[in-house]
């Protein structure tokens, strides 16, 4: 009881950030935590004075992030629910470049890694990260508590994390409309089938402006929620998606309408294994409500499938990879085998298909070269993924031609 009382005192002392964070945890349940183990934990943590004031800046937060990653490593396929590859999050944040005083939103925030990286990036550049306003929604109760504690232990005060289902019950609303934000970073749960499509047909928030996704794949429901959550002037977003959102036939009409609205600024094709504990290829779609004049009516395609480092079936973006991709995004020019600036008309001529290899032709690599085992493995994985993409496209074409 003394431990539960102490936890309640912690919540009460930090009501805005931590209210209810420990829930109804039973510290007296010996099936989960024996007296001996509990005593060892108390003795261990009592040996040091752990506080944000006493511990060097950010060490508590770094320790907590380490534990989050450790749990992700040990949890198998469920890790993707609360942990996104931090090297990729860093790139997405660099592409959107949040500024002091701006609002940053993640509609499916998991452990708040994207919100955290946005703050840390400002801090690294000598800017006041405390002036960022952070917002997140997370459907899982425990994960939402992890998110709040993660931000709190990094010394961040101005955040609001709410537990709830973003599609069925969005939490951030102003004047009977969805609240809008300067920056939206997201890694939505991919291709979920258990969602309320019927409600989305008559969505009270107007998130079906480009169409209603199929029951089996809610990706474009999240996509449209994000678009509606962007500030009409400063709004920009980077969304991590599975590769299929770029070309699947069932979403062709929605994809075409979004592109014709001139919202998509960049499509970044990435290699396999960047999703946690999944070999799927991924992509990042960058949108901007008000594109610069020179980018209007254009989309930059970046073929970065080989810009990864593979380690134990998990891929990472090293600093060199991120800088190469970021430079290409900022330059916004054609580069043989890597980038292509395409017009909306070219997109329409490709049957509203955003698949990166349609626009960026690979450079001939038939010349002699020495490759590591990892590089050969990546090439093999890419061949398998490209074969599947080709098959999916063929099925789509046959379907449109009337073949069953």
Image (cartoon, rainbow, N blue to C red):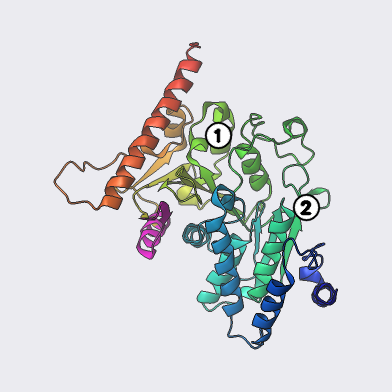
Judged from this view, the residue extending furthest toward the left is 368
Q: Which residue is mark 1?
A: 255
Return the residue nearer the eye: 209 or 313: 313
For the point 60% across and 39% down, the residue is 219
Residue 199, image x, y percentages: 77, 33
Q: Quadrant of residue 62?
A: bottom right
Asked whether the residues under the numbered discs 1 and 2 touch, taking CB atoms below 8 Å apart as contact, a structural biologist would say no
Q: Whole-percent x and y of residue 364?
A: 21, 41
Residue 45 lies left or right of residue 90; in this view the side is right
Residue 135's place in the image compared with 240, above or below, is below
> In the rendered image, which quarter contains the N terminus?
bottom right
- Report the disc number at residue 322: none
Circle 2 — which element?
A: loop
Q: Foreground mark, 1 or 2?
A: 2
Say above or below: 68 vs 215: below
Q: Is residue 7 above or below residue 307?
A: below
The percent coordinates of residue 176 (x first, y second) are 83, 48
Identity of the residue drawn at 65% across and 38% down? 221
Which region of the structure is painted magenta?
Answer: 310-330
The percent coordinates of residue 220 (x first, y second) are: 61, 38
- Neighbours of disc 2 within 10 Å: few (<14), some (14-19), many (20+): many
Q: Which residue is labeled 2 in the image?
A: 171
Cα separation, mark 1 vs mark 2, equals: 26 Å
In the displayed structure, does residue 361 sit left or right of residue 389?
Answer: left
Q: Relative to 149, is 175 on the left or the right? A: right
Asked whether residue 58 is in view, the answer is: no
Please name the residue shown 39% across and 28% down the image: 390
**Camera-side residue: 27 or 90?**
27
Q: Is residue 220 magenta?
A: no
Residue 279 seen anywhere in this rendered image of the structure: yes
Binning the other alpha carbons within 10 Å of mark 1 as few (below 14), some (14 to 19) or many (20 upward) gives many
The answer to if 323 sits in the magenta stretch is yes
């Amino acid at each position: 009881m003394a431990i539960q009382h102490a936890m309640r005192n912690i919540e009460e002392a930090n009501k805005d950030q931590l209210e209810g964070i420990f829930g109804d945890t039973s510290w007296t349940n010996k099936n989960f935590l024996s007296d001996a183990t509990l005593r060892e934990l108390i003795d261990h943590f009592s040996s040091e004075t752990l506080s944000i004031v006493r511990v060097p800046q950010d060490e508590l937060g770094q320790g907590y992030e380490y534990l989050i990653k450790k749990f992700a490593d040990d949890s198998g396929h469920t890790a993707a629910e609360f942990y996104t590859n931090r090297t990729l999050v860093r790139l997405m944040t660099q592409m959107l470049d949040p500024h002091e005083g701006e609002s940053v939103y993640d509609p499916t925030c998991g452990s708040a890694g994207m919100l955290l990286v946005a703050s840390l990036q400002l801090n690294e550049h000598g800017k006041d990260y405390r002036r960022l306003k952070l917002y997140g929604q997370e459907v899982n109760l425990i994960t939402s508590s992890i998110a709040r504690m993660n931000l709190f232990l990094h010394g961040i005060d101005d955040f609001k994390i709410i537990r709830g289902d973003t599609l069925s019950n969005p939490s951030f609303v102003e004047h009977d409309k969805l609240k809008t934000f300067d920056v939206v970073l997201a890694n939505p749960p991919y291709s979920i089938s258990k969602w309320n499509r019927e409600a989305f047909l008559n969505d009270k928030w107007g998130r079906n402006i480009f169409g209603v996704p199929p029951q089996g794949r809610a990706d474009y429901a999240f996509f449209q929620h994000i678009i509606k959550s962007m500030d009409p002037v400063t709004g920009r977003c980077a969304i991590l998606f599975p590769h299929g959102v770029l070309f699947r036939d069932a979403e062709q009409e929605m994809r075409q309408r979004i592109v014709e609205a001139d919202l998509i600024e960049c499509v970044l094709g990435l290699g396999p294994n960047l999703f946690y504990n999944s070999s799927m290829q991924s992509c990042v779609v960058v949108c901007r409500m008000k594109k610069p004049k020179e980018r209007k009516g254009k989309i930059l395609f970046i073929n970065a499938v080989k810009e990864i480092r593979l380690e134990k079936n998990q891929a990472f973006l090293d600093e060199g990879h991120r800088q190469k991709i970021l430079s290409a995004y900022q330059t916004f020019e054609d580069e043989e085998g890597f980038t292509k600036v395409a017009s909306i008309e070219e997109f329409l001529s490709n049957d509203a298909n955003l698949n990166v290899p349609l626009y960026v032709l690979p450079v001939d690599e038939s010349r002699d070269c020495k490759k590591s085992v990892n590089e050969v493995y990546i090439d093999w994985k890419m061949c398998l993924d490209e074969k599947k993409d080709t098959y999916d496209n063929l099925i789509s074409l046959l379907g449109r031609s009337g073949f069953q």
